[in-house]
Amino acid sequence: MRKKKIVVAITGSSGSIYAKVLLDKLLQLGGQLETVGVVLSDNARINWELEIGPVDLSVYPYSFYEKNDFYAPFASGSAKYDTMIVCPSSMGTLARIATGVSNDLVTRAADVMLKERRRLILVTRDTPLSLIHINNMKAVTEAGGIVCPASPSFYSKPVGLEAIAATVVDRVLDLAGLEADSFRWGG
């Protein structure tokens, strides 16, 4: 199996636990990955501190990029990143992606993934949804993206917040084409 190049964008929606569990699980899948690039919005940092505690990204062996670093490799299709995961994706980020507004590295990279016909997965977390949100999800889906709401499953009987978040992250890893050990229905 060819190793994958993944970009993870963490935006300002509540649900930092999903991003943390995703980064942790990608550590476990390191043998399947060539590189992981990560970008956080300002609001992502704020929410992470409010929901989890201090942001200490030094524990991750990934390449971190500033939100306005348009020289990041995944800001261009020529870098050939395989998948971008926006986790969690705020509705504002979804709207900018849906309408092609590339005003920061997150939205530029998402635009690149769509134009190159590569995998873009948006892990939305907000609820309830307005018709504007639904139409933006439709636009992203029609453009080739995948909207994967952070809707945990409970048939595996997860215990604790990280295990509950992992039910969503495991699904995202499947959508990204990574082989992860997770609960399988009927397995």
Image: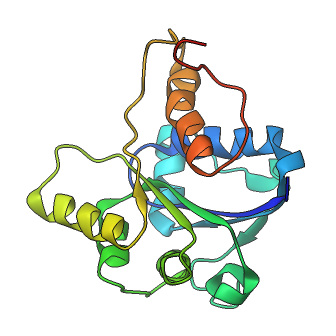
Q: Where's residue 8, x and y in %?
A: 62, 61
Instruction: Tell me how many marks there are.
Output: 0
Q: Please give left or right for residue 45 compared with residue 135 in the image.
A: right
Q: Is any atom of residue 52 visible in this view?
A: no
Q: Work out whether 80 lies above or below 153.
A: below
Give the residue furthest to the right: 31
Q: Please give left or right for residue 169 compared with residue 142 in the image.
A: right
Q: Please give left or right for residue 27 compared with residue 162 in the image.
A: right
Give the residue furthest to the left: 131
Q: Is any atom of residue 182 visible in this view?
A: yes
Q: Front-most of 139 and 61?
A: 139
Question: Which residue is found at the position 45% from the left and 62% from the top?
Answer: 43
Q: Work out whether 66 lies above or below 137.
A: below
Q: Quadrant of the C terminus?
A: top right
Q: Where's residue 71, x and y in %?
A: 70, 91
Report which quarter residue 77 is drawn in: bottom right
Q: Where's residue 60, x and y in %?
A: 80, 51
Q: Where's residue 155, x and y in %?
A: 45, 12
Question: Which residue is found at the position 61% from the left and 52% from the top?
Answer: 176
Question: Which residue is found at the position 68% from the left and 67% from the top?
Answer: 82
Question: Which residue is found at the position 70% from the left and 72% from the top?
Answer: 81
Q: Work out whether 111 lies above or below 151.
A: below
